[in-house]
Amino acid sequence: METYDVIIVGGGPAGSTCAWALRRAGLDVVVIDRATFPRDKVCAGWITPHVVMDLRLDVQEYRQGRTFQPFTGFRVGLIGGRADVDTAYEAPVSFGIRRCEFDQYLLQRSLARLRLGTPISSLRRDGLFWVVNDCFKARMLVGAGGHFCPVAALLNGSTDGAALVVAQEAEFAIDPREVSFSTTVPERPELYFSRTLNGYGWCLRKENYLNIGFGHLDRHRLPSAVAEFSAFLEARGRIPRDASWRWKGHAYFLSEGRRRRVVDDRVLLIGDAAGLAYPHSGEGIRPAVESGLIAASTIVEAHRGHTRDPLRLYEVRLRERFGRRHGLSSFVSQAVPSQLGRVLGPLLLRTPLFVRHVLLDRWFLHTHEPALALVA
């Protein structure tokens, strides 16, 4: 039996960030994940300057052999539409990364003990300890395993009624000299929304990689929506006609809908396991990183007595940081009648001031929220 101060189930950005902060505080931490790293992950793959600050990321070091594409603008429009809105910024507002590289880097940097390729077969309590797989024991357990996290299932049971996004994505290397990719500008990701405004697709270049994908609030509608979006990109010359690649699927909770339990006796949930992805964009890297930092700070403060009440502070801090937010889909479905929303939404997406200051700055980039700066 291996004994640690903290067991973290899940080695993505939430788990690795939490482990990194705990190790800096001197705690003995193990990260367990069923996957082996580097791994592929369905994600458009960008981080904002706030995430760089949250992680204290050494950009020059990270760039050595890894993709790090500055984004200085966006193109926003409707799938099937003709009038797009181009928005330019004076400095990079986001950076394109490849999740297979990013997740591996954060996990290795954490300096935690790693038990990868290890599925969770059992979780049980033994007095003051959590025991995992009858092999690992710790006084504190952190669930960071995403939508299907076994720790989250232990705390919440069925996920019926939760706000769930389903997505498909493909990322592949390209030859930038090919004419078929000449219209895709590396510094300017493209976002295209469905006319019902309950899903959107993306097309972005990250140096010599192209990433395309689509996220939707209706899992039954996803296949046809992806096909429609692919045809739209082909017609615009963003991707070659009749090209084939392997689509990958993923699902995750949004930070609205049914409230999830994130705290119990000596156990916390972070990242997608806690359902923290932003409801307006579905973006989950920043909430994952920041919830990992908040959890680590709370665990360190309560290290001498991991009982239920001190850890309730984590829930309070999480609510203060993320709260209940409303995005484009909830704006259309809740703030105005559905028929009016279908008219008003496309109109707003053709309005440069709305696209820049509301959709991009507030809902996608969250420029109004400062970095946490919790790590000493």
Image (cartoon, grey):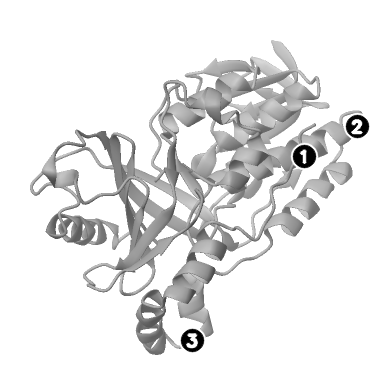
> How far apart are labels 2 and 1 at the CA level?
21 Å
- The amino acid type, in three-letter code, at marker 1 is Leu
* Location of mark 2 (residue): 305
In this view, the residue farthest toward the right is 304
Please report the residue visible at 14 percent of the width from the left and 40 percent of the height from the top: 244
Residue at the farthest left position: 242
Q: Earlier in the sequence, mark 2 or mark 3?
A: 2
Q: Which mark is residue 374?
A: 1
Specify the amino acid type for callout 2: Gly
Q: Is residue 316 left or right of residue 355?
A: right
Residue located at (60% from left, 28% from top):
58
Residue for badge 3: 336
Pick out the residue farthest to the front.
90
Q: Upstream in the sequence, badge 1 or badge 3? A: 3
Q: Secondary structure at mark 3?
A: loop
Nearer to me, 23 or 221? 23
**Residue 134 visible in rendering:** yes
Q: Is residue 343 left or right of residue 123?
A: left
- In front: mark 1 or mark 3? 1
Could you tell me how far apart the alpha carbons at marks 1 and 3 are, in whole angstroms?
A: 39 Å
